[in-house]
Image: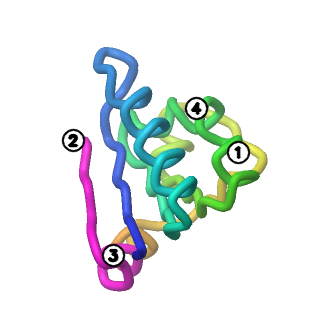
Amino acid sequence: MKLGIILATGFESEDRHTVQRLAEAALGQGHQVSLFLTADGCYSAPFLADLSEKGALLICCAKNLEARGLPPVPNVHGSTQYACASIVAEVDRVVAFV
């Protein structure tokens, strides 16, 4: 199964922790995981970057990074909202944290 996860919330919620555990569980079961960070979810990029070493695809909206004054994060691809739409179109299930 291909799982898409969209994270748009910042540190005020526990979503980052939930996203990390969900992605790790899916990867552990042999599923493909694509994670798109947007809006305040971009603040979580450094904390979720290690998921790429476990096989997840991590993409962060480059414009949202720039707007927040955040630097690019190793192992996290910078892209556009088109990448988010592509993930949604290509996966079997999508979970959004907004």
Label 2, label 1: how many angstroms apart (C-alpha)? Answer: 22 Å
Q: Residue at x 39, y 80 (%)?
A: 86
Task: Give the image location of residue 89, x and y in percent.
Answer: 31, 83
CB contact under 8 Å: marks 4 and 3: no
User: What residue sits right under mark 3 in the picture?
Assistant: 85
* Amino acid bearing label 2: Val
Q: Residue at x 61, y 33 (%)?
A: 70
User: In the displayed structure, would residue 39 be above or below residue 88?
Assistant: above
In the rendered structure, find residue 69 and report the number of the disc placed on it. 4
| The C terminus: image quadrant | top left
Sooner in the amino-acid sequence: mark 2 or mark 1: 1
Q: CA distance from mark 3 to mark 2?
A: 15 Å
Q: How is the image coloured?
A: rainbow
The vertical placement of 64 against 11, above or below, is: below
Q: Would you call the spot at circle 2 few (<14 residues within 10 Å), some (14-19), or many (20 or more)? A: some
Q: Amino acid at mark 1?
A: Pro
Q: Nearer the viewer, mark 1 or mark 3?
A: 3
Whether the magenta-drawn stretch holds residue 19 is answered as no
Label 1 sits on residue? 72
- Nearest to N terminus: mark 1 or mark 3: 1
Q: Which residue is mark 2?
A: 98
Q: Secondary structure at mark 4?
A: loop
Q: Nearer the viewer, residue 64 or 10?
A: 10
Q: Position of residue 63 (x, y in %)?
A: 49, 53
Q: Is the residue 11 above or below the residue 81 in the image?
A: above
Q: Is residue 75 visible?
A: yes
